[in-house]
Image (cartoon, grey):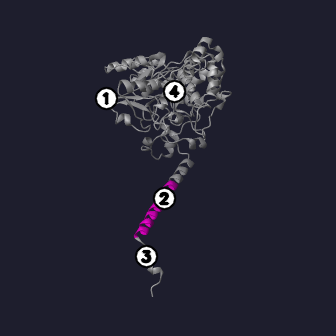
Amino acid sequence: MISQRSMIVISPPCIAQQRRRRRALSICIYFSIVAFIYHIMMMLYLAHDLPDPISNLSPQLPIKNKQQQQQSSLLSYEHHSISRKLTDQQIIEHRPSTATSLHTHTSVITDGETIAAILQGDINFREYLANSSTTPPTTPTKATTPRLRFMPGQITNTNLTKANILHHCYSNPDIYARHFPGKSYRQVSTISDKYKLVYLHLPKAGSSTSRYLLEHSLDGHNAPLNPAGNDLNTRYVNYTVFTFVREPLQRFYSQYDEVFLRYAPWVKRKRYFKHPYPFIYTNITTLAAYRNIYCPLELIPSYIREEKMNNTRAFILWRTKQQTKENGTLALRFEQFVEKYNSLSPWDVHLHLQVPHISNKYTGRPRRVDEIYSTDANKTIINWEKMVKKYGRSLPESNESFNARSAPRRYKTSLVSNETKQKICRISAIDYCCLNIALPTECSDIGIHCSLGVNKLGEFQIQPWQHPHEID
């Protein structure tokens, strides 16, 4: 007698569905096991206080405790390929010394000519340290990292361009992690395949003007670059890579103006966004109220008001182009912002520092840049005229399009205190050092210096002598 259960026949579609479910379940179990094993390995790695073999290849701050070590991220997938298990003796030798600070090796300022000679290979770095009076009183051990101290903008050797100096820069990924292009904002570039040019955008350094000119004069098109890739050395290896940079203090003024307007209360934004510094908008809730601060109606001549008031758009445009007449309230808000601003946690790309923004977020090294131009003293158009002339082209006749975003400063920078300017200089120290830009007068004697060191791979590293978070 045949039972009813044995008479049940499973149709082919049901069998296929069951197989798919088993396959999906198997994949989930497999990845769960892999993730669990990886988690256990990382816990064991951190529990034994093993130093990161890559972070010890370059001068960094001593890790004070276990919690800080756990917060330190792994630097690069490239470097992990050369990672290896260290012996106990190697661990002792590689661990940074907590007794000797990286900033106590020398108090002597090295002149720019010597730094240039070292970078060019005319002077051996280690021999210079051993023979000069700038070395510490005791011979440095393997735990210490000897460095040379020099002033920003003092490398005047004509054989070393800004691009040459930038090549030796190092933006520590653990410190400047938020200043690298990320997933939501990849490295933006404008590329001309016809003339083999790649322009790396730097926000608030003439990027809108440069993008427009490259598109309309040299047949350029926008193309984002992978922030972790090596496309400039592969796909665009035969292209000339260039960028425009700006004096950091003047750029910071413009950065603040940009983010002030972008995140103002009258601008619609996503609901979940919470401004980190809302006090800068106190009693300024509308665009009309903001306009009435930098261009008060009572200060506008009556004949202008009578002429423009009938055309609201023309009147607004006229007010936009006027020099600010604010009484200091906007400058005070700017000073309060700088005082509270955490420079290592920018919330908008327009607040990024220049050097980290064009660097690889894993290695901390700048992308390949062949030519660097300046936007200071209205040099942007002049430099572009020279550039397009090399290719037998000319700039567009009308300049209205690429100057559309330019407007007078809304707050009076003349009212900004020297203390505020000095903090901005400290925040921007890596740009001053790596771009070889001299400090402004207000910041020239407050102890901002650059350092030149050599990592374990024998590569030069130019960094600020003190990073922003190390300053009291």
Q: Quadrant of the C terminus?
A: top right
What residue is rendered at 33% in x and 29% in y? Answer: 196
Any part of residue 451 in sight: yes
* Residue type, mark 3 in image: Val
Q: Measure how far apart labels 2 and 4 are at the Cα level.
A: 45 Å
- Number of the label disc, if any, that sits on residue 28: 2
379 part of magenta stretch: no
Q: Measure how far apart labels 4 and 3 are at the Cα level.
A: 74 Å
Secondary structure at badge 3 equals loop
Badge 3 vs badge 2, beta-carbon distance below 8 Å:
no
Closer to viewer: mark 2 or mark 4: 2
Q: Nearer the viewer, residue 247 or 165?
A: 247
Mark closer to the chain start, 4 or 1: 1
Magenta segment: 12-37
Mark closer to the chain start, 2 or 4: 2
Q: Measure how far apart labels 4 and 1 are at the Cα level.
A: 34 Å
Q: Residues within 10 Å of mark 3 (few under 14, many from 20)?
A: few
- Number of the label disc, if any, that sits on residue 9: 3
Q: Residues within 10 Å of mark 1 (few under 14, many from 20)?
A: few
Q: Which residue is mark 1?
A: 194
Q: Is residue 142 above or below residue 434?
A: below
Q: Which residue is mark 4?
A: 430
